[in-house]
């Protein structure tokens, strides 16, 4: 019985912070600077998730990941389709590790 109370409690603790902002955000008008800051969060989170992986592709040779990351950035900047950007970065790592 106690395990069910714990599971339900954990479910509420994770669901409540996700649901409340969905209902509140429609009623709040944020200043422009806050909206710009909120729009930048996905890019910052993406960078925080990707950068450590770039540096640890091959732990002894971090420059390989950096080169592959630069290739991906350049191709993305040229607006190449995301699949080709990812495949190009993978190919870069493969070619540099041969």
Image (cartoon, grey):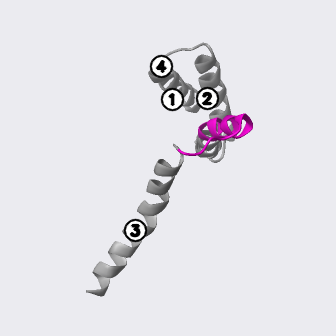
For the residues bearing labels 3 and 4, Cβ distance under 8 angstroms: no
Q: Which labelled disc corresponds to residue 68?
A: 2
Secondary structure category for the residue under label 1: helix
Query: Going by the image, does 16 lie left or right of 68?
Result: left
What range of the chain is rendered magenta?
27-42
Q: Which labelled disc corresponds to residue 19?
A: none
Quarter in which the N terminus is drawn: bottom left
Q: Measuring 65% from the left and 43% from the top, which residue is drawn there?
A: 55
Most common secondary structure along the magenta stretch: helix
Q: Measuring 52% from the left and 22% from the top, which residue is drawn there?
A: 85
CA–CA distance between discs 2 and 3?
42 Å
Residue highlighted by disc 4: 84
- Going from N to C along the chain, the mark reached first, 2 or 4, is 2
Quarter in which the C terminus is drawn: top right
Q: Which labelled disc corresponds to residue 90?
A: 1
Give the foreground label among 3 and 4. 3
For the residues bearing labels 2 and 1, Cβ distance under 8 angstroms: yes
Secondary structure category for the residue under label 4: helix
**Residue 31 sits above or below residue 13 on the image:** above
> Which is more toward the observer, 28 or 7?
28
- Going from N to C along the chain, the mark reached first, 2 or 1, is 2
Residue highlighted by disc 3: 12
Give the foreground label among 1 and 4. 4
CA–CA distance between discs 3 and 4?
41 Å
């Amino acid at each position: 019985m106690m395990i069910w109370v714990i599971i339900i409690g954990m479910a509420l603790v994770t669901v409540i912070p996700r649901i409340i902002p969905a209902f509140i955000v429609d009623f709040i008008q944020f200043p422009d600077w806050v909206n710009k800051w909120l729009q930048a969060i996905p890019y910052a989170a993406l960078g925080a998730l990707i950068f450590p992986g770039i540096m640890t592709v091959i732990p002894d040779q971090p420059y390989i990941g950096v080169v592959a990351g630069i290739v991906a950035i350049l191709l993305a900047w040229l607006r190449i389709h995301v699949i080709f950007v990812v495949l190009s970065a993978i190919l870069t790592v493969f070619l540099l590790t041969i």
